[in-house]
Image: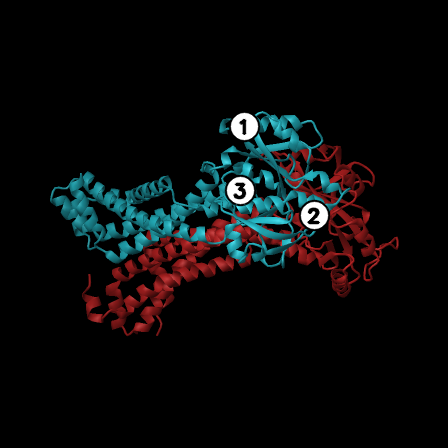
Chain colours: A cyan, B red
């Protein structure tokens, strides 16, 4: 069987321009398929990132925009299996001119003494941790944000509140490195309460809690215990893994699964068309040659195999081009601005790559079936008569 | 002298399989682009139609969305006495204090519930929104636990029919009417009495925003400036039209992704078109020679093949637009990043989107046609005639 391989390969090199164009055309489409596949995998199929598997987000059952009583924190901490619970408050607000998208980044209020217990995967120098702990107006930011804003330690950061009617005046005391945290600023929740002042209705309201669970297999049961505990109180909760919580925001974009699937289907079909077209053209030009092969004793089966193989080789080469392009493109996307976590970690994993190559080969073979079958069935005399 | 267009058309029909396959490849590319444009257009018009240039929306300074509007009652009292505010039939200024929050409604496709915007307002708020009318039933009465739902809600949520009870806040609310507006945003909202809703969500001290009706467009602009310049108020005002414009950003990620996909697919498709055109040139070498003998210049050969390629892509563009047409009757929904609730809207593949799609197709055809056409034009007469 492999003795025909060199013939297939040589055949695909005959019209080099056509083969090259086909390969690049298929490659472009498959590159797209690879990137979208990686995105799909990153969004819906990826295992939780390190640190995420032990973390729960507890928020109001109705919507993350509605608040929970701060008193829930102590109750959550008493649930068996909970290692630590911390207030996790979206502050919002705006920095400098809010109309400029460049000034947008996430701003959260947290409890500095618990922050590194709930998010143990985050690292920050010890002296900076101490500073965050002791300076009430201290803030820490993720390194990507610090780089983008050209901040330095000691930088004064003024935020104007919107949800909360206060304007924090913060000092940057620490820079965290964490692959899971992008473009975020954290400051003390205590500072927020202090600014709100006594008697403010928001004094007792918390957006959400982050919970560190003792072991991964307890995550589900802990979430259920917490939700059951508050089910009949005035503010019911919903506890979910950090990953599921993040997916909620992706679902804001509409039916992302369907959207990705539809585009992938369109792309796959385009590849099929391109490959089928090329093979139809190249077989049409070689009908006479097929006749000669037959007179030499090649059976219709061998001829079918030869043509299908050629298409497979061509498409698989296109697949390689696509894979390389996809790897390059994901590198570019990772560096670029992103609005969701999945884009920061976008990679062509081996399974996506292998799937891509397999799909390319399969599409090639499938697309050539009709012209190959016709060529193998054309009677010798008729093929020889054909002028090409 | 130009070669007649009929020559190109006939050539395309003779090789109908190849033509159709290439055109379909282009069609799919165009379809992806137009579908994305239709989605963005749909969302755009959902918002844009809903702004009234006479209405001025006031929120706390720094707030970007009504949900986090944070207007205080004191600020509202001061605000009402500003000049330029229209007077209602009762002689009072037409300024509506409103509370915007989010509730959760389940339906068949989302058993966990989707977030819906709930707006508490008084009679004056309804007066200002003269384009929002009752389609069925009646308006809610002041002081009653009654709500009116937008028509998209009535359609999408069985639980929100007239006479049914919705459970949110501190108890049950009766649905007494369905409202219809030219704005999809309003059609995706629920309206109820301000005082009742404030009570249920403990927001007596801090509603969200105020909608104020100015006497004319000049007064509206003056009002916006006067509110923004007033340091005591600490408020941010803009016309409703401006506000709605800023709300369409939810579709931006989908738009970027869609355009990115379409461009990569286009590169692939123009290579495929190039392939087809190279094959056409190779097959018709003799014809090219004959045409030259008949006295057609190199220039007209170049133009002819170029036009043929563009015709091929126009066919593809047309097919692509046809593929997308059925989308016009499809209603989809997205979550808004600013209101944290669902907005239902129609895809809108209008003439503009289609024109962009056709232009895009032509571009693919032009890129795919220019090199093969040059090759055809460069052929020497004798060589071309000898070619089989």
Q: How far apart are marks 1 and 3 (CA)?
A: 26 Å
Nearer the observer, disc 1 or disc 2? 2
**Furthest residue toward left:** A296
Which mark sits nearer the N-terminus, 2 or 3?
2
- At horizontal 53% and vertical 39% (from top left) the residue drawn is A119
Q: Name the residue under label 1.
A: A220
Give the Cα separation between the discs numbered 1 and 2: 33 Å
Whether label 1 touches label 2, CB < 8 Å: no
| Disc 3: which residue | A255
Q: Is residue B273 above or below residue B323?
A: below
> Is A355 displayed left or right of A174 in the figure?
left
| Residue B344 % position (x, y) | 62, 45
Quadrant occupied by the N terminus of chain B: bottom left
In the drawing, does residue B101 fall left or right of residue B326? right
Chain ID for label 1?
A
Question: Which numbered disc, 1 or 3, marks the residue closer to the eye?
Answer: 1
- Circle 2 chain: A
Tag 2: Cα neighbours inside 10 Å, few (<14), some, or many (≥20)?
some
Element at label 2: loop
Is residue B48 something that shows in the picture?
no
Q: Earlier in the sequence, mark 1 or mark 2?
A: 2
Crowding at dot 1, Cα within 10 Å, few <14 / some 14-19 / many 20+, comes out as some
Mark 3 closeness class: few <14, some 14–19, many ≥20 residues within 10 Å: some
- The residue lying toward the viewer, choosing from A387 and B110, is B110
Task: Determine which of the numbered discs, if any, sits on residue A164 in the image.
Answer: 2
Report the quarter where the C terminus of chain B lies.
bottom left
Q: In this view, does A52 lie to the left or right of A8?
A: right
Do marks 2 and 3 both belong to one polypeptide chain?
Answer: yes
Q: Which chain carries label 3?
A: A
Q: Which mark is first along the chain, 3 or 1?
A: 1
């Amino acid at each position: 069987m492999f003795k025909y391989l060199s013939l297939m390969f040589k055949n695909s090199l005959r019209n080099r321009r056509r083969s090259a164009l086909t390969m690049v055309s298929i490659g472009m489409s498959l590159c797209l398929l690879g990137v979208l596949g990686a995105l799909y995998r990153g969004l819906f199929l990826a295992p939780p990132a390190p640190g995420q598997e032990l973390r729960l987000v507890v928020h109001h059952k109705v919507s993350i925009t509605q608040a929970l009583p701060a008193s829930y924190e102590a109750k959550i901490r008493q649930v068996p299996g909970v290692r630590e619970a911390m207030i996790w408050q979206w502050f919002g607000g705006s920095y400098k001119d809010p109309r400029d998208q460049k000034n947008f980044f996430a701003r959260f209020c947290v409890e500095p003494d618990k922050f590194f217990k709930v998010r143990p995967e985050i690292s920050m120098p010890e002296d900076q941790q101490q500073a965050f702990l002791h300076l009430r107006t201290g803030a820490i930011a993720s390194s990507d944000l610090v780089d983008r804003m050209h901040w330095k330690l000691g930088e004064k950061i003024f935020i104007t509140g919107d949800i909360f009617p206060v304007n924090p005046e913060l000092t940057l005391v620490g820079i965290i490195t964490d692959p899971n945290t992008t473009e975020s600023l954290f400051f003390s929740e205590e500072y927020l309460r202090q600014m709100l002042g006594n008697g403010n209705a928001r004094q007792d309201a918390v957006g959400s809690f982050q919970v560190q669970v003792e072991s991964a297999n307890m995550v589900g049961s802990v979430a259920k215990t917490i939700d059951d505990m508050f089910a009949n109180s005035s503010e019911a909760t919903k506890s979910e893994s950090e990953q599921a919580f993040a997916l909620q925001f992706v679902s804001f974009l509409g039916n992302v699964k369907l959207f990705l699937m539809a585009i992938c289907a369109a792309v796959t079909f385009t590849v099929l068309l391109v490959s089928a077209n090329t093979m139809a053209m190249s077989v049409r030009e070689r009908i006479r040659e097929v006749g000669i092969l037959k007179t030499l004793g090649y059976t219709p089966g061998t001829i079918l195999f030869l043509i299908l193989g050629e298409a497979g080789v061509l498409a698989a080469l296109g697949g390689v081009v696509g894979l390389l392009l996809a790897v390059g493109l994901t590198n570019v996307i990772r560096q670029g601005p992103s609005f969701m976590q999945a884009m920061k970690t976008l990679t062509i994993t081996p399974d996506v790559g292998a799937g891509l190559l397999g799909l390319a080969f399969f599409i090639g073979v499938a697309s050539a079936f009709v012209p190959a079958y016709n060529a193998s069935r054309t009677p010798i005399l008729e093929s020889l008569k054909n002028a090409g | 002298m130009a070669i007649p267009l009929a020559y190109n058309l006939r050539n395309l029909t003779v090789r109908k399989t190849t033509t159709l396959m290439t055109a379909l490849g282009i069609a799919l590319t165009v379809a992806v682009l137009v579908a994305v444009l239709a989605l963005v257009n749909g969302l755009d018009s959902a918002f844009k139609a809903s702004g009234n240039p006479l209405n001025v929306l006031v929120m706390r300074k720094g707030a970007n969305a009504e949900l986090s509007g944070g207007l205080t009652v004191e600020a509202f009292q001061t605000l009402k006495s500003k000049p330029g505010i229209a007077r209602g039939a009762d002689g009072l200024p037409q300024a509506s204090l409103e509370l915007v929050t989010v509730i959760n409604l389940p339906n068949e496709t989302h058993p966990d519930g989707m977030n819906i915007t709930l707006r508490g307002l008084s009679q004056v708020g309804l007066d200002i929104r003269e384009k929002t009318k009752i389609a069925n039933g009646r308006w809610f009465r002041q002081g009653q636990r009654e709500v009116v739902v937008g028509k998209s809600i009535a359609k999408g949520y069985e639980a929100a029919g007239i006479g049914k009870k919705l459970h949110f806040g501190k108890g049950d609310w009766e649905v007494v009417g369905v409202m219809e507006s030219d704005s999809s945003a309003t059609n995706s909202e629920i309206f109820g009495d301000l005082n009742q809703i404030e009570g249920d969500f403990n927001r007596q001290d801090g509603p969200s925003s105020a909608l104020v009706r100015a006497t004319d467009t000049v007064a509206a602009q003056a009002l916006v400036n006067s509110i923004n310049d007033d340091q005591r108020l600490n408020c941010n005002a803009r016309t409703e039209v401006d506000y709605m414009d800023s709300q369409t950003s939810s579709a931006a990620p989908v738009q970027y992704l869609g355009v990115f996909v379409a461009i990569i697919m286009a590169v692939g498709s123009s290579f495929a078109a190039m392939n087809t055109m190279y094959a056409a040139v190779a097959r018709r070498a003799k014809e090219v020679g004959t045409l030259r003998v008949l006295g057609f210049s190199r220039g007209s050969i170049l133009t002819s093949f170029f036009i043929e390629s563009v015709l091929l892509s126009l066919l593809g563009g047309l097919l692509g637009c046809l593929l997308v047409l059925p989308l016009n009757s499809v209603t989809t929904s997205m979550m808004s990043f600013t209101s944290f609730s669902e907005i239902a809207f129609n895809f809108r593949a209008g003439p503009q989107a289609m024109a962009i799609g056709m232009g895009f197709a032509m571009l693919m055809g032009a890129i795919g046609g220019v090199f093969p056409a040059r090759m055809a034009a460069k052929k020497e007469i004798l060589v071309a005639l000898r070619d089989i």
